[in-house]
Image (cartoon, rainbow, N blue to C red):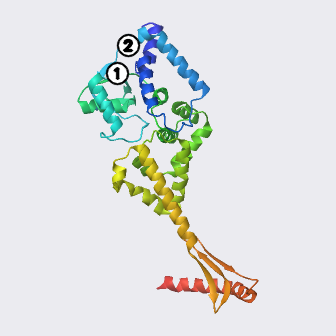
Amino acid sequence: MNKASNRAKRLAGMFGAVDPNELAKQAEVEKSDKTTSRPMTTAPTKALQASFASIEEENLRLKAELEKSQTVELDPVTVRASIIQDRLEWTDDDPDFQSLVTSIKEEGQRLPILVRPHPAENGQYQLAYGARRNRACMVLGQKVKAYVQELSDEELVIAQGLENNERKNLSFIEQAVYAVALLEAGFTRKLVAKSVGVASDTTISKMSAIVALVPADIFRLIGPAPKIGRNRWEAFASLADRGAKKSSILEAVRALPESAVWKGADSNKRFELAYRTAEKADKFRTTKSRAEKSRLENEGRSFGTMEQSSNAVKIFLDAKKEPAFAQFVADKMTALIEEFKKGEGKQASK
């Protein structure tokens, strides 16, 4: 096999022998669904854009040879998950997935998936990209078109990321969760940035911060939320962080799946419901905390105020109006602490 043929097969392997025109059509469809969304703050770097342009040029120049690189048909059952999951979990009744199933049923599978021979299971394959297409073919009871390519872990991750970036089919939060999963698996920040398609380490750090603050079960409850960008997720993460100190905030969000409005909502709507619920719970916590304030009064005399919340008890003594009382309390403070400690010891010995 000559070098040009090898080169063609290698490129086909990384991108599943994708027809650039077909890929562009699908990208336009997905873009049209996001016209009302907040602009994504994670944009490909100039170097990554140049890489995409070069890949597209290679596809066009070698199109004739690529078309000769035939895909194979595999039993979807033999295709195992990727080493790193790049999507939040979805179910077969998800509307977007159902649309994909209908499309493949009526028009056939246009874009092949990319797999490699499974490194640990003989006769099985490991997915690089195309999990939903593979699952759709499984649901339909048909073979899945695939290109089988020998790939290292790094090559698999890069191919997975570049395909996602080219089609722009991962939401911000899916990108963030995917980036953190890659970092935790030991991949370098440089490779992670290239795979996720972000501009800098700073963006990776911001993604990591959001994922660290929002519990994983909350991500799964909400779903991909493709119209929700980084700013909104950062605001929600801030509420979730406060929720870590006040469990009622997160408890309120976790109770949402029981509501009828949640069950009928897509993931974008679910994010909004979760955000408003967390915000409301946080405001209730703040209001309640401020309301527990009392004046220290006796027989018409005002000695000060006491403020009590779940985090602190603050006593303010008016040293101008009642200086003798203020000094009396100050002098008694050490004795009060000692008395409290003695009482603790008696309770412990019982």
To which quarter of the image does residue 301 belong?
bottom right
* Residue 271 percent location from the top left of the image: 45, 48
Direction from residue 345 to residue 261 in the image, left or right: left
Which kind of residue does numbered mark 2 sit on? Answer: Ser
Of residues 217 and 228, the one drawn nearer to the viewer in this rendering: 228
Q: Which residue is mark 2?
A: 69
Dot 1, how many residues are within 10 Å of its Cα: few (below 14), some (14-19), or many (20+)?
Answer: some
* Amino acid found under the numbered disc labelled 1: Arg
139 or 13: nearer the viewer: 139
Q: Is residue 41 above or below residue 274?
A: above
Does the rendering let one see residue 219? Answer: no
Q: Which residue is mark 1?
A: 110
Quadrant that contains the N terminus: top left
C-alpha distance separating marks 1 and 2: 15 Å
Q: Earlier in the sequence, mark 1 or mark 2?
A: 2
Of the two numbered discs 1 and 2 in the rendering, the one whose residue sits closer to the viewer: 1
Residue 169, numbered label? none
Q: Is residue 325 left or right of 139 when viewed as pictured? A: right
**Residue 34 position within the rendered picture, expressed as x and y whole percent measured from the top left:** 46, 34
